[in-house]
Image (spheres, grey):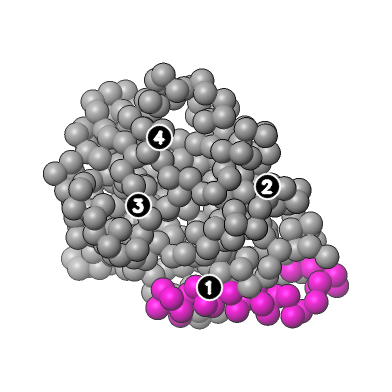
Amino acid sequence: MKLTSYSRFAGCGAKLGPGVLDQALCGLSQRSFPQLIADFRRAEDAGVLKLDEERALVHTVDFFPPIVDDPFTFGRIAAANALSDVYAMGGAPCTAVCLVGFPVGTLEMSILVKMMEGGLAALDDADCPLVGGHSIDDTEPKLGYAVTGLVHPRRVWLNNSLHAGERIILTKPIGTGLITTAARSGKASEEALAAACASMGTLNRRASETLSRFAVSACTDVTGFGLLGHACEMSSESGCRIRVDSAAVPLLPSVRDYAAAGTVPGGTNRNRSFRQKLVTGPRARDEELLRILFDPQTSGGLLAAVEASDAARALAALQGAEVPAAIIGETIPGDGQIELI
């Protein structure tokens, strides 16, 4: 039986939907903690707590049902996805704890072992030890990790601290949601699915470590809200507008074909309904393009803002480290909107 057949969310990013958790959290009243650098109030990728003048603790969690059928590949993707939030804050992962839901009476335990082996392989690539975990008997398999990391308190990358006159770099091609959705219906090519799995299973470690040598003002990773959704988070309340050059956005194989055919995950429409009002410019009503740019990603690349004077050198350094990065836009003074050209 296909692993993805257990999941109602397979291929759609496995998110509750844009803003759902934010809406729940905004009703909470939490007392002030002076050492907190980042928490849920800013919709950051991870929480950051200052420990001392040289160290801050980064903490994040992510888990989801299978988006591919091979259990080892799914496990690797789940770990890479969870680790990514620490890299997006400019940090280095230190420890991981696994979160497992598994239908014990339905699936063979060997499948869970393969899932865990895939996750452990990604954690090993991150030099991040697995220190424990928690499991429940569930109706569908789920896997993820709570990851802790460290970062210098003055070198934390927040996601909406943009300045005008910067360049926007994306470190992975997009289209994983379109491809995994097409694969679920038997319409994805082997080339496209292999490329998507390779991209999702690749850590953002090299991208983060390379970018740390340059003047990064803001950073996030592109996941369930899609490229435009996360770009909107970056521009929100920043006093800037992001101008995205749609022709410069790198795509995985066959993504345009699947978008044209309307083979899109359900998360795409939720992303669009939540954020499309903030998208303007000459390409803002291009239906096929919006299906791609709002496509929910799993374990996507970093989206980083760097000073214009650093952009070419940063891109060359990333590409020299075999990171498939591209400059996809710029920041200009504005109202937090995304200008799509």
Q: Mark 3 vs mark 1: give the one in front.
A: 3
For marks 3 and 1 on the same chain, the one whose residue lies earlier in the sequence: 1
Would residue 79 be seen by someone viewing this image from the given angle? Answer: yes
Q: On the image, numbered disc 3 is attached to which residue? A: 325
How many residues crowd around disc 4 within 10 Å: few (fewer than 14), some, or many (20 or more)? few
Amino acid on which the number 4 mark rests in the picture: Ala
| Percent position of residue 133, x then y | 59, 75
Q: State the residue at coordinates (60%, 57%).
A: 191
- Residue 105 inside the magenta-drawn segment: yes
Q: On the image, numbered disc 2 is attached to which residue? A: 181
Q: Mark 1 vs mark 4: give the one in front.
A: 4
Query: Quarter of the image containing the C terminus?
Result: top left
| Percent position of residue 126, x then y | 41, 73
Say which of 258 and 2 sits in front.
258
For marks 3 and 2 on the same chain, the one whose residue lies earlier in the sequence: 2
Magenta segment: 102-129
Amino acid on which the number 1 mark rests in the picture: Val
Query: Quarter of the image containing the N terminus?
Result: bottom right
Q: On the image, numbered disc 1 is attached to which residue? A: 97
Q: CA distance from mark 3 to mark 2?
A: 24 Å
Q: On the image, numbered disc 4 is attached to which residue? A: 247
For marks 1 and 2 on the same chain, the one whose residue lies earlier in the sequence: 1
How many residues crowd around disc 2 within 10 Å: few (fewer than 14), some, or many (20 or more)? many
Locate residue 175 relative to residue 173 in the image: left or right: right
Q: CA distance from mark 1 to mark 4?
A: 40 Å
Q: State the residue at coordinates (46%, 79%).
A: 124
Q: State the residue at coordinates (79%, 68%).
A: 103
